Image (spheres, helix red, strand yellow):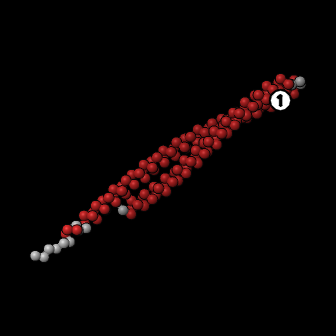
Amino acid sequence: MTGTFRGAKSVEKLLKIARLDVEALRVDLADIERAQETSKRALEDILQSVRREAKTAEDAQAMAAYEDAMRERRVNIRKTLNALESAADTARDKLNAAVAEMAKLEHLADVNARQAAHASRRREARTASEQPSPTARIRYSG
Protein backbone atom coordinates (compact mmCIF):
# COMPACT_ATOMS: atom_id res chain seq x y z
CA MET A 1 0.00 0.00 0.00
CA THR A 2 2.72 2.46 0.91
CA GLY A 3 4.50 1.83 -2.41
CA THR A 4 1.36 2.62 -4.38
CA PHE A 5 0.82 5.76 -2.34
CA ARG A 6 4.41 6.90 -2.89
CA GLY A 7 4.10 6.10 -6.58
CA ALA A 8 0.91 8.15 -6.80
CA LYS A 9 2.61 11.07 -5.06
CA SER A 10 5.53 10.87 -7.50
CA VAL A 11 3.18 10.79 -10.47
CA GLU A 12 1.29 13.81 -9.12
CA LYS A 13 4.56 15.74 -8.74
CA LEU A 14 5.65 14.79 -12.25
CA LEU A 15 2.23 15.74 -13.59
CA LYS A 16 2.45 19.15 -11.95
CA ILE A 17 5.89 19.70 -13.50
CA ALA A 18 4.61 18.51 -16.89
CA ARG A 19 1.70 20.95 -16.74
CA LEU A 20 4.09 23.80 -15.93
CA ASP A 21 6.35 22.75 -18.82
CA VAL A 22 3.41 22.67 -21.23
CA GLU A 23 2.30 26.13 -20.13
CA ALA A 24 5.84 27.52 -20.48
CA LEU A 25 6.16 26.01 -23.95
CA ARG A 26 2.80 27.50 -24.97
CA VAL A 27 3.99 30.91 -23.81
CA ASP A 28 7.27 30.48 -25.70
CA LEU A 29 5.44 29.50 -28.88
CA ALA A 30 3.08 32.47 -28.54
CA ASP A 31 6.08 34.79 -28.12
CA ILE A 32 7.69 33.38 -31.25
CA GLU A 33 4.46 33.76 -33.21
CA ARG A 34 4.13 37.38 -32.04
CA ALA A 35 7.70 38.05 -33.15
CA GLN A 36 6.88 36.54 -36.55
CA GLU A 37 3.87 38.81 -36.94
CA THR A 38 5.93 41.82 -35.92
CA SER A 39 8.59 40.94 -38.48
CA LYS A 40 5.98 40.45 -41.21
CA ARG A 41 4.52 43.87 -40.39
CA ALA A 42 8.02 45.38 -40.51
CA LEU A 43 8.52 43.93 -44.00
CA GLU A 44 5.24 45.42 -45.14
CA ASP A 45 6.11 48.76 -43.54
CA ILE A 46 9.42 48.84 -45.40
CA LEU A 47 7.71 48.18 -48.72
CA GLN A 48 5.21 50.95 -48.07
CA SER A 49 7.98 53.28 -46.97
CA VAL A 50 9.95 52.66 -50.16
CA ARG A 51 6.82 53.32 -52.23
CA ARG A 52 6.16 56.60 -50.37
CA GLU A 53 9.76 57.72 -50.73
CA ALA A 54 9.76 56.85 -54.43
CA LYS A 55 6.75 59.11 -54.97
CA THR A 56 8.30 62.07 -53.16
CA ALA A 57 11.98 61.54 -54.04
CA GLU A 58 13.65 64.36 -55.91
CA ASP A 59 17.20 63.00 -55.92
CA ALA A 60 17.61 59.70 -57.83
CA GLN A 61 20.97 58.96 -56.22
CA ALA A 62 19.60 59.42 -52.71
CA MET A 63 16.60 57.27 -53.59
CA ALA A 64 18.87 54.50 -54.88
CA ALA A 65 20.86 54.56 -51.64
CA TYR A 66 17.62 54.49 -49.65
CA GLU A 67 16.34 51.52 -51.68
CA ASP A 68 19.64 49.67 -51.12
CA ALA A 69 19.40 50.26 -47.37
CA MET A 70 15.80 49.09 -47.30
CA ARG A 71 16.65 46.04 -49.41
CA GLU A 72 19.31 45.11 -46.85
CA ARG A 73 16.80 45.56 -44.04
CA ARG A 74 14.31 43.31 -45.86
CA VAL A 75 16.99 40.63 -46.28
CA ASN A 76 17.78 40.82 -42.57
CA ILE A 77 14.11 40.64 -41.62
CA ARG A 78 13.61 37.64 -43.91
CA LYS A 79 16.57 35.94 -42.22
CA THR A 80 14.93 36.70 -38.89
CA LEU A 81 11.63 35.29 -40.15
CA ASN A 82 13.38 32.10 -41.28
CA ALA A 83 15.03 31.75 -37.87
CA LEU A 84 11.70 32.39 -36.16
CA GLU A 85 9.98 29.79 -38.33
CA SER A 86 12.63 27.26 -37.38
CA ALA A 87 12.25 28.21 -33.71
CA ALA A 88 8.46 27.90 -34.02
CA ASP A 89 8.78 24.42 -35.54
CA THR A 90 11.10 23.36 -32.73
CA ALA A 91 8.78 24.89 -30.11
CA ARG A 92 5.77 23.09 -31.63
CA ASP A 93 7.65 19.78 -31.58
CA LYS A 94 8.63 20.31 -27.93
CA LEU A 95 5.07 21.34 -27.05
CA ASN A 96 3.60 18.28 -28.75
CA ALA A 97 6.04 16.01 -26.91
CA ALA A 98 5.28 17.73 -23.60
CA VAL A 99 1.52 17.44 -24.15
CA ALA A 100 1.92 13.74 -24.94
CA GLU A 101 3.99 13.24 -21.78
CA MET A 102 1.41 15.14 -19.74
CA ALA A 103 -1.36 12.96 -21.18
CA LYS A 104 0.55 9.82 -20.17
CA LEU A 105 1.01 11.14 -16.65
CA GLU A 106 -2.66 12.14 -16.43
CA HIS A 107 -3.63 8.62 -17.47
CA LEU A 108 -1.25 7.13 -14.91
CA ALA A 109 -2.63 9.42 -12.19
CA ASP A 110 -6.16 8.33 -13.15
CA VAL A 111 -5.16 4.65 -12.98
CA ASN A 112 -3.54 5.25 -9.58
CA ALA A 113 -6.67 7.01 -8.31
CA ARG A 114 -8.89 4.15 -9.49
CA GLN A 115 -6.58 1.59 -7.86
CA ALA A 116 -6.56 3.55 -4.61
CA ALA A 117 -10.37 3.78 -4.65
CA HIS A 118 -10.63 0.05 -5.33
CA ALA A 119 -8.20 -0.75 -2.50
CA SER A 120 -10.16 1.53 -0.17
CA ARG A 121 -13.43 -0.23 -1.03
CA ARG A 122 -11.79 -3.62 -0.43
CA ARG A 123 -10.50 -2.45 2.97
CA GLU A 124 -13.94 -1.14 3.92
CA ALA A 125 -15.57 -4.40 2.86
CA ARG A 126 -13.00 -6.43 4.79
CA THR A 127 -13.42 -4.26 7.88
CA ALA A 128 -17.21 -4.53 7.63
CA SER A 129 -17.05 -8.33 7.33
CA GLU A 130 -14.77 -8.63 10.36
CA GLN A 131 -17.13 -6.71 12.65
CA PRO A 132 -19.73 -8.83 14.36
CA SER A 133 -23.29 -8.21 13.43
CA PRO A 134 -25.56 -6.55 16.02
CA THR A 135 -27.61 -9.70 16.42
CA ALA A 136 -24.52 -11.79 17.13
CA ARG A 137 -23.88 -9.87 20.34
CA ILE A 138 -27.18 -10.83 21.91
CA ARG A 139 -26.90 -13.96 23.98
CA TYR A 140 -29.92 -15.74 25.04
CA SER A 141 -29.87 -17.49 28.32
CA GLY A 142 -32.29 -20.15 28.43
Q: Which x, y percent locates residue 19?
A: 52, 50
Q: Which x, y percent locates residue 26?
A: 58, 44
Q: Residue at x 39, y 54 (%)?
A: 113
Q: Residue at x 45, y 55 (%)?
A: 11
Q: Which x, y percent locates residue 136?
A: 19, 69
Badge 1 marks a residue whose secondary structure is helix
Q: Residue at x 89, y 25 (%)?
A: 59
Q: Is residue 56 left or right of residue 89?
A: right
Q: Which x, y percent locates residue 128?
A: 27, 64
Residue at which label 1 appears: 66
Residue nearest the observer in this picture, 34 or 100? 34
- In the displayed structure, 112 sits above or below 60; it is below
Residue 117 visible, this orientation? yes
Residue nearest the observer in this picture, 44 or 77? 44
Circle 1 Cα neighbour tier, 10 Å, few/some/many (<14 / 14–19 / ≥20): some
Q: Residue at x 54, y 43 (%)?
A: 95
Residue extending farthest right: 59
- In the displayed structure, 70 sits above or below 2; it is above
